[in-house]
Image (tube, helix red, strand yellow):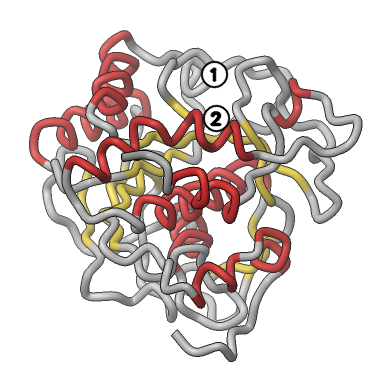
Amino acid sequence: MADDWNLSWQHRTLGIAELWRRQITGRGVTVALLDTGLARPDGLDRDSFQYFDARGTATAAHDPSGHGTCCASVIACTRGGALGIAPDVRIASFRVLETGNDAEEVEQALAHILRRRPDIDLLSCSFVIDDASPALKAAVRALGRQGRVVIGAAGDRLDLDSGFPELTPGAITVAAVDEQARPLPGAKTGAWIDLAAPGLDLPAVAPGVDHLVLFGESSAAAAVVTGVAALALSTRAPGPARRRLGSALEGLLKATAIAPPDADPDAVGAGVIDPARLIQAAAAIP
């Protein structure tokens, strides 16, 4: 990557360019995007990306909502002005949302990934599910035991409880903050939130539009953390060392996060993610 990047505020806040200069770009890491699908706008039109339904059957690139494409943009876009955090990752998109039965589709996708996709290192899950089944929760735990990282969005409605990720051990749950590291007004809070990340007005690419859009809330923050986790995992070659780092990643993310002054832990968890501190701490994992 060249150094003439058109960076957004989240890159500057998190010091992402310094990691890119060290060739830490997510290369070699595969992210499963569980969402509304994935289109191919400029910046996400990559031959290395894959497109599936919830059962793992190959489909065309398609995202009628745009939510999944915006999440993918925050993670992996290569278009200047809307660069992803980890622009060299591979993405396997599983369309599980807005299909009529979100919980069942998510459960099927997780089961497929457990059985058939040992190459997937990291799962991006920028959604909440009201009633998460025991099988869904068991799949998240099983992925965690394998050193595969599941990242979820805290949600953005105070009045809505969720079985996933709120009540699902093993999912790293992310809240959103603004440029001053303040929680977004009206956002979901609770002791189950693990950490926070930038999540207000992040430039992104979307299906069917040539201009950039602004994407935000906890969905965007979870995508940021997915990208940062991919950067950390890319410092290890595929195999046992990467899986050991994946198993340690939740604890490392929390231990290296920075708590803003007077922060409410129920709003930001351990604090705002700090990629440089995370990668430095990850170096100590054998």
Please give the name of the residue rendered at 68% of the width and 27% of the height, measured from the top-left corner: 269
Instruction: Give the class, few, some or many, for how many residues have Cα within 10 Å of label 1's Cα (few <14, many ≥20).
Output: many
Please give the name of the residue rendered at 34% of the width and 57% of the height, measured from the top-left corner: 234
Rendered position, 263 above or below 204: above
Label 2 vs label 1, nearer the camera: 2
State which tag comes first along the sequence, 2 or 1: 1
Q: SS of the residue at dot 2?
A: strand
Whole-percent x and y of residue 132?
A: 40, 15
Please give the name of the residue rendered at 51% of the width and 35% of the height, measured from the top-left corner: 252
Rendered position, 260 above or below 224: above
Whole-percent x and y of residue 181?
A: 81, 46
Amino acid of disc 1 = Glu
Check disc 1 and report the residue beneath it: 166
Check disc 2 and report the residue beneath it: 173
Q: Is residue 189 left or right of residue 42?
A: right
Q: SS of the residue at dot 1?
A: loop
Identify which residue, 20 or 163, lies in the foreground.
20
Rendered position, 216 above or below 183: below
Task: Quarter of the image for the C terminus: give it.
Answer: top left
Quarter of the figure with residue 122:
top left
Q: Name the residue at the right extreme.
A: 262
Tally the numbered discs. 2
Identify which residue, 237 or 207, lies in the foreground.
237
